[in-house]
Image (tube, rainbow, N blue to C red):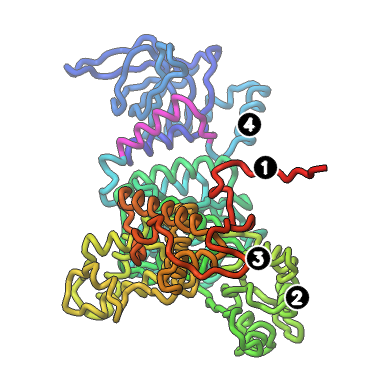
């Protein structure tokens, strides 16, 4: 047996304390390096059991040394040999070391102990019996130097024997013995088959122990990372009875802990079944399992599975996953963490974000990763104008038509739930709360995930959305930021979509040039990830022979890669209004410039007439153009290139007045009206009107 397991076995055994008044003599001898027999004079017997005894001495003895022991009590005499399996002290400054000695002659020791115990007084015998009865089957694992020495020994064994055949089997046998259980198994994930597979098992053939990573207690521990200690009589919701029917077992209690690798990824679980003579495993068993889980994590610290076919995000290749959240920004990492938090909850989830930001993708991953992932996933597009179709999908009693009934045990996605009419909202919230569709005999078992690009709380305030429905579906809330606020993810997304599209089209991998990539990084993506995906797909389709996509392709007016029409639908035709690189004040100056130049052009270059039609003075027109010209100059110096209209601006800025048409009520020399003069034009503070007596 491994040294660490011998130590633990000795440590966990129940031993009888030896009192000085018993006159139980113990003589101890050992051989030195030269082979000479040395008598240990200060050896003191502390306790004794059938399998071992404890000795205290100031002499230093190495673990593994064989001792010759001579026990004498009254007329009884016993000669034994034993091996030192552990050594520890009670405190840091204690010179005396306590040694655990494992005995091999159990039958002989048993007879000696029978005689020794029979001589106890009735009070002492009663105390020993009470102590033995009140203790666990094996003594509690205490903290301190004693346990520390065990862990050091165990670490040494793992380092030397962890990869040897039979190590896991020996370990599992000790686990079952220590926890006083019936069976035990170790499962590791197989990412290719998306199954937990037993690599070592007691009580059943390990080849038959394999199942989907989301099933049963082991699946729950693997996906959530939370250890479980349950009895199947009171908590059968997560227990899969198929295992018992399949193997002819009766599972009464289970304790299960996750196993991690060196990257702290959950790679499997250790499961122990059926505590003997008790309904469930104890709190002390949980503490012991925590240590054992660390031991097995050390054994498998190099196990790092990865596969292109895996459904498990932490083991699948990001560029080959069907559903993946791509990006490295803090927000994307936060979204991944949110998936781990809410994937196994049964509460509804509301996902808010702009159109094209990835709300539906997030909802699908939430379903696949969670414990409902084996069941169906359906979605209803609430933004559709075909209300008859939506009503049938939500409220029909026919399981073939009603998607709420169709995905029993799974998840339903209400896309753009903000588009539902008020009357349907009221009916829906009653169904979700009652978990029952009127006229149907089936009780609903479905998780609701809703998405919205509109602010539902604002719609509630305007009485455009039912308050009860909003409160029900927003019990868990997820906010997805638009792509322009996490622009550092563009490069990762482009790389992902390029590989995916090139593979789909059967082409060699393409790349964007540095200039075109820079252009993609500075674009604000009003259509978010959906627009970026479309841009990359167009780039691949338009360039079947080019391996490098240049920036010229982005600006091609005939076949543009960027969806300019989408941008115009959001921001309109007004220039600069959507350029997020420019501050609002400067943006307004540039917008005014374009409007002034357009008005001057419409009036055939007549600045005074253009100013009059815009309701400002000729001088105000000139000053606004001077301000905008300075903005253009400053932006160009800062490296922000802006395309502006020229139309002979130098001539417009010239102070020379041209002939203008004059109305009968105002001559060319007449100053502008009070309404046309702004504080900027006056160059002084506007004083409040003062009434004159």
Q: Quadrant of the N terminus?
A: top left
Front disc: 4 or 2: 2
Q: Residues within 10 Å of mark 4 (few under 14, many from 20)?
A: few
Residue 426: which disc? 2
Query: Circle 2 — which element?
Result: helix
Q: Quadrant of residue 531?
A: bottom left
Q: Quadrant of residue 84?
A: top left
- In terms of sequence position, does the residue under pointer 4 or pointer 3 come before the other? 4
Magenta-tinted stretch: 139-157
Q: Quadrant of the C terminus?
A: top right
Alpha carbons under labels 3 and 1: distance apart: 46 Å
- In terms of sequence position, does the residue under pointer 4 or pointer 2 come before the other? 4
Residue 687: which disc? 1
Q: Is residue 350 visible?
A: yes
The residue tagged 3 is 456
Query: Circle 4 — which element?
Result: helix
Front disc: 2 or 1: 1
Task: Reply yes or no: does residue 148 show up in magenta.
Answer: yes
Q: Position of residue 181 (x, y in %)?
A: 52, 51
Q: Position of residue 180 (x, y in %)?
A: 52, 47
Q: Are marks 3 and 1 in contact (CB under 8 Å)?
A: no
Residue 129: which disc? 4
Q: Position of residue 456 (x, y in %)?
A: 65, 65
Foreground residue among 538 and 243: 538
Foreground residue among 519 and 538: 519
Alpha carbons under labels 2 and 1: distance apart: 57 Å
- In terms of sequence position, does the residue under pointer 3 or pointer 1 come before the other? 3
Front disc: 2 or 3: 3
Alpha carbons under labels 2 and 3: distance apart: 15 Å
Q: Which residue appears at 29% of the width and 26% of the height?
A: 66
Q: Residues within 10 Å of mark 1 (few under 14, many from 20)?
A: few
């Amino acid at each position: 047996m491994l040294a660490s397991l011998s130590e633990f076995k000795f440590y966990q055994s129940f031993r009888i304390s030896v009192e000085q008044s018993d006159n139980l003599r113990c003589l101890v001898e050992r051989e030195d390096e030269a082979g000479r027999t040395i008598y240990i004079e200060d050896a003191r017997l502390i306790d004794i059991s059938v399998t071992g005894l404890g000795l205290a001495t100031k002499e230093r003895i190495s673990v593994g040394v064989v001792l010759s022991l001579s026990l004498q009590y009254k007329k009884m005499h016993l000669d034994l040999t034993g091996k030192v399996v552990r050594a520890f002290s009670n405190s840091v400054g204690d010179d005396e070391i306590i040694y655990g000695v494992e005995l091999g002659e159990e039958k002989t020791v048993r007879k000696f102990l029978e005689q020794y115990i029979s001589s106890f007084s009735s009070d002492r015998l009663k105390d020993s019996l009470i102590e033995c009865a009140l203790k666990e089957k094996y003594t509690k694992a205490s903290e301190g130097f004693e346990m520390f020495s065990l862990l050091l020994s165990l670490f040494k064994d793992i380092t030397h024997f962890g990869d040897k055949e039979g190590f896991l089997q020996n370990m599992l046998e000790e686990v079952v013995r220590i926890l006083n259980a019936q069976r035990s198994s170790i499962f590791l994930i197989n990412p290719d088959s998306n199954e937990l597979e037993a690599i070592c098992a007691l009580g059943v053939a390990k080849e038959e122990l394999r199942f989907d990573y989301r099933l049963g207690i082991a699946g729950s521990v693997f996906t959530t990372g939370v250890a479980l200690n349950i009895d199947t009589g009171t908590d059968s919701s997560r227990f899969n009875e198929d295992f018992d029917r399949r193997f002819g077992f009766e599972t009464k209690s289970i304790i299960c802990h996750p196993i991690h690798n060196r990257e702290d990824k959950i790679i499997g679980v250790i499961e122990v079944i059926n505590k003997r003579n008790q309904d469930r495993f104890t709190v002390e068993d949980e503490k012991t399992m925590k240590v054992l889980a660390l031991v097995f994590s050390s054994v498998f610290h190099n196990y790092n599975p990865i596969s292109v076919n895996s459904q498990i995000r932490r083991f699948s290749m990001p560029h080959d996953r069907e559903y993946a959240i791509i990006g490295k920004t803090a927000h994307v990492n936060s979204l991944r963490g949110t998936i781990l938090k809410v994937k196994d909850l049964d509460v509804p989830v509301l996902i808010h974000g702009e159109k094209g930001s990835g709300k539906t993708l997030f909802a699908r991953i939430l379903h696949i990763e969670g414990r409902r992932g084996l069941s169906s996933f359906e979605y209803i597009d609430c933004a559709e104008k075909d209300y008859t179709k939506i009503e049938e999908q939500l409220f029909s009693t026919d399981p073939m038509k009603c998607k709420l009934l169709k995905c029993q045990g799974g998840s339903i996605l209400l896309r753009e739930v903000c588009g539902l009419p008020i009357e349907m909202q009221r009916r829906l919230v009653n169904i979700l709360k009652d978990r029952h569709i009127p006229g149907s005999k089936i009780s609903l078992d479905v998780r609701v995930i809703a998405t919205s690009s509109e602010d539902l709380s604002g719609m509630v305030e305007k009485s455009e959305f039912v308050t009860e429905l909003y409160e029900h579906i927003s019990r868990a809330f997820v906010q997805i930021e638009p792509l322009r606020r996490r622009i550092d993810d563009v490069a990762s997304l482009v790389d992902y979509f390029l590989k995916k599209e090139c593979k789909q089209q059967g082409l060699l991998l393409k790349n964007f040039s540095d200039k075109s990539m820079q252009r993609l990084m500075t674009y604000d993506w009003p259509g978010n990830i959906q627009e970026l995906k479309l841009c990359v797909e167009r780039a691949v389709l338009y360039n079947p022979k080019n391996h490098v996509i240049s920036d010229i392709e982005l600006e091609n007016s005939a076949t543009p890669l960027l969806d300019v029409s989408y941008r115009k639908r959001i921001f309109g035709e007004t220039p600069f209004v959507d350029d997020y690189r420019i501050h609002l004040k400067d943006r307004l100056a540039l917008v005014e410039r374009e409007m002034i130049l357009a008005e001057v052009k419409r009036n055939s270059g007549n600045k005074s007439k253009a100013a009059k039609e815009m309701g400002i003075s000729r001088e105000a027109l000139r000053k606004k153009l001077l301000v905008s010209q300075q903005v253009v100059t400053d932006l160009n110096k800062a490296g922000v290139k802006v395309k502006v209209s020229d139309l002979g601006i130098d001539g417009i800025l010239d102070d020379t007045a041209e002939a203008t048409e004059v109305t009968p009520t105002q001559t060319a020399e007449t100053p502008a009206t009070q309404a046309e003069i702004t504080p900027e034009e006056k160059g002084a503070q506007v004083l409040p009107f003062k009434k004159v007596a």
